[in-house]
Image (cartoon, grey):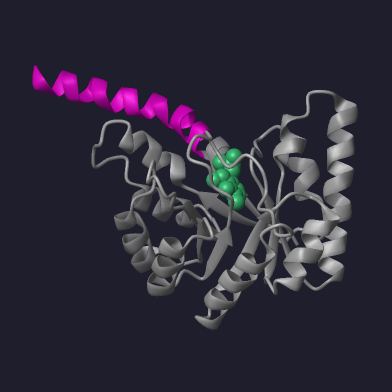
């Protein structure tokens, strides 16, 4: 059976926020993604609200018919929001304001008390909890000790590796971490930087039940949809002067 696909619609919101407009709406994108077979909709409500807004989360909670996966920092403000909105799953991610995107995994070892507390609070509210961590055995063990349901492995190092030998090494690290996590009874997910060129070896790892992919899908959507969008505008211009 293939891995489930979580489609991350953050960058539809990025495009909207670039103009502070009302479109494109990530809610519409989520509905289309579900029609196309997405198994889950993933959004990251960042503390700086640079793309997804609180309104998006609230509307998506009402409209998503698969599963809603909310990525967020393990911060009090976010825990309160999750507690009220109740997504099916929360993925705890590290967050730094100056970063372009989530640059590394959560430190489940160093931040163990806080992570464990947040995991417990969310699980007590019947929300599944995933920890976004690097493919590292100590992090896997810490996630298990924190009683997370799932670990999502950060695939950035694999995706960014330029040399084939480095890429093979990163893939091997990922495979080892997936096996270790599955052995401990954790559900296994992966994501970050996956695209149409690099996804196959990761999607082939049997332990991975879910992949979360955003930027590459939204970026491809812009290009595969552009021709039609231009044609439709041309038709509109022609209609103005029959
Ligand atoms: N998984 C997690 C936990 C993430 O933080 C992100 C990025 O928001 C993704 C998956 C998707 O990454 P990308 O947009 O590079 O596909």
**Quarter of the figure that contains the N terminus:** bottom right
Residue 146 in view (yes/no): yes
Q: Is 59 displayed left or right of 144 in the figure?
A: left
Given residues 23 and 71, the one toward you in this image is: 71
Q: Is 239 displayed left or right of 212 in the figure?
A: left
Task: Verify whether residue 233 appears in magenta.
Answer: yes
Q: Which x, y percent locates residue 62? A: 34, 68
Q: Is 139 displayed left or right of 114 in the figure?
A: right
Q: Residue at x 10, y 21 (%)?
A: 240
Looking at the image, residue 48 lies above or below residue 143: above
- Judged from the image, the quadrant occupied by ligand 1 is top right
Q: Is the magenta stretch mostly helix, strand or loop?
A: helix
- Write down the region rendered in magenta: 218-242
Given residues 122 and 219, the one toward you in this image is: 122
Q: Which x, y percent locates residue 83? A: 43, 73
**Quarter of the figure that contains the C terminus:** top left
Q: Which x, y percent locates residue 110? A: 71, 57
Farthest-out residue, left: 241
Looking at the image, residue 77 lies above or below residue 107: below
Q: Which residue is drawn at 87% across and 62% down?
A: 180
């Amino acid at each position: 059976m293939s891995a489930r696909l979580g489609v991350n619609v953050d960058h539809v919101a990025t495009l909207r926020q670039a103009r502070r407009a009302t479109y494109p709406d990530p809610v519409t994108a989520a509905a289309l993604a579900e029609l196309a077979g997405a198994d889950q909709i993933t959004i990251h409500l960042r503390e700086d609200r640079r793309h997804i807004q609180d309104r998006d989360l609230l509307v998506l909670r009402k409209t998503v018919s698969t599963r809603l996966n909310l990525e967020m920092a393990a911060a009090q403000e976010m825990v309160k929001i999750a507690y009220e909105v109740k997504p099916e799953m929360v993925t705890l991610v590290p967050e730094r304001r100056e970063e372009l995107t989530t640059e590394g995994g959560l430190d489940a070892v160093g931040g163990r008390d806080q992570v464990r507390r947040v995991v417990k609070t969310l699980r007590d509210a019947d929300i599944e909890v995933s920890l976004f961590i690097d493919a590292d055995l100590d992090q896997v063990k810490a996630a298990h000790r924190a009683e997370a349901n799932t670990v999502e492995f950060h695939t950035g190092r694999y995706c960014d590796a330029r040399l084939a030998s480095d890429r093979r090494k990163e893939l091997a690290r990922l495979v080892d971490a997936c096996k270790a996590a599955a052995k401990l009874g954790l559900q296994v997910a992966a994501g970050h930087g996956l695209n149409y060129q690099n996804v196959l070896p990761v999607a082939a790892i049997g332990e991975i039940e879910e992949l979360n992919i955003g930027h590459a899908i939204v970026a491809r959507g812009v290009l595969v949809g552009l021709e039609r969008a231009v044609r439709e505008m041309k038709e509109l211009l022609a209609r103005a002067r029959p």
